[in-house]
Image (spheres, rainbow, N blue to C red):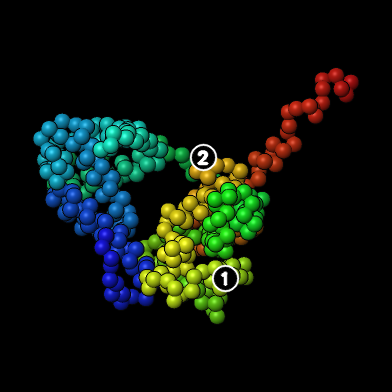
Amino acid sequence: MPQLKIQNKTDKPDNVVEREAKVLDEYRKLQEQLPGFLKGFYVYLNGNSLPLTRLSYLRDIRFFFSYLLSETPLGSDRKDIKEIRAEDIDALKARDVNYFIDYCRHYSVKDEDGIETVYENSNASLSRKKSSLSVMFKFLYRDGVISSNITDGFDPIRLPKPGEREIKALQDDEVMRMLDAVVTGDGLTEHEKDYWEKTKLRDKLILLLLLTYGLRLSELQQLNVSSFNFERGEFKIYRKRGKESIMPVNRTISEAFSEYVSLERAPEEELPPESRDALLLSLRGTRLTDRQLRQIVKKYTSISLGTSRDRGYSPHKLRATAATSLIGRGNSVYDVQELLDHDNVTTTQLYAAHRLNTKRELIKGFEWGDDMIKPDEGK
């Protein structure tokens, strides 16, 4: 995407407007790759879903059309996705979509260099693909583009019930080990320590912001220095749906912010113009990307969990850690819902039902080993 020039007439920071513009730009580019009979569908999505949701729908639909060309007889008549016609879609049966969903469970793609990549999707991913296609087929039927609604014939995909899912969150002792690692460097490789010496205050602030407020990755990545108003003891974040939210600053965050900005973050005059207000910077002086933030979090959580780097936790699991920790300290489920911006309180209640140490305490006194009482003892 070429460099954007922002003409911002809102009170949103330019980086937030730019991020939204990039999502919309990718969305428009996907539209250009898809058949013309979907034009009304785009209008429908624009009025009924968020930009990232619209983007996900079109990615799934493009993949479905690619599948039709590569894995079905339609590919003998059509060589490009844009050549697919409405009558081709109208000729599809529910079983054709079911075959596609089954194909998505496990498939492989070979690139131009002959390297084959294997893809495997969970039921949650399959359900999202099915949902994307259901929305499209229902709209095309409602709009008269196709003659029948085949979605009732789509096979169900079993997803775990809310109570069946194991909530992954750090326990209090694991949180302390993680914070100790970022302060002391313990657990880091020699190569990692070279970077840690220059970024430990930044990394500490990242972890504390995630643990304290349960921020989403996008909310953390978009933070600016100007987002914080310490005279009022607060900072502003931008939620999903363009919603603004004011968060209070506690002493821990205030001290971590001050240390990072005054002792480690590059002076504003040394930074490129587009990075001068960005809070979390790379060593190159650019705003940290989502990917870089994920790598930082996985690194420190893997140390606390005693596992490999690739098995460390994602930022979203620190969001879960914030929820379980707050509820475990007796805070109201409704207050935690407001802090974390959950649409429905039932989502927050999942964390309330998650007893962090129940299983551990249950098993702790139930050992099988040398300390067991032998059958003839006690006679």
Q: Nearer the viewer, residue 315 or 194?
A: 194
Q: Nearer the viewer, residue 57 or 334?
A: 57
236 lies above or below 116: below
What's the residue at 31%, 41% (across, down)? 130
SS for dot 2: helix
**Viewer-side label of 1, 2:** 1
Q: Quadrant of the N terminus?
A: bottom left
Q: Which residue is mark 1?
A: 263
What's the residue at 66%, 43% (across, down)? 358
Q: Looking at the picture, how far across and down is residue 24, in whole percent?
A: 27, 60
**For the residue carrying disc 1, how many other residues have a C-alpha within 10 Å: few (<14), some (14-19), or many (20+)?**
few
Does residue 11 show up? Answer: yes
**For the residue carrying disc 2, how many other residues have a C-alpha within 10 Å: few (<14), some (14-19), or many (20+)?**
few
Residue type for callout 1: Leu
In the picture, measured across the screen, residue 285 lies left or right of residue 137, that is: right
Residue type for callout 2: Glu
SS for dot 1: helix
Q: CA distance from mark 1 to mark 2?
A: 46 Å
Q: Nearer the viewer, residue 92 or 211?
A: 211
Q: Quadrant of the C terminus?
A: top right
What's the residue at 56%, 73% (across, down)? 262
Q: Which mark is on residue 22?
A: none
Does residue 175 show up? Answer: no
Q: Looking at the picture, how far across and down is residue 278, in whole percent?
A: 44, 69
Q: Which residue is mark 2?
A: 164
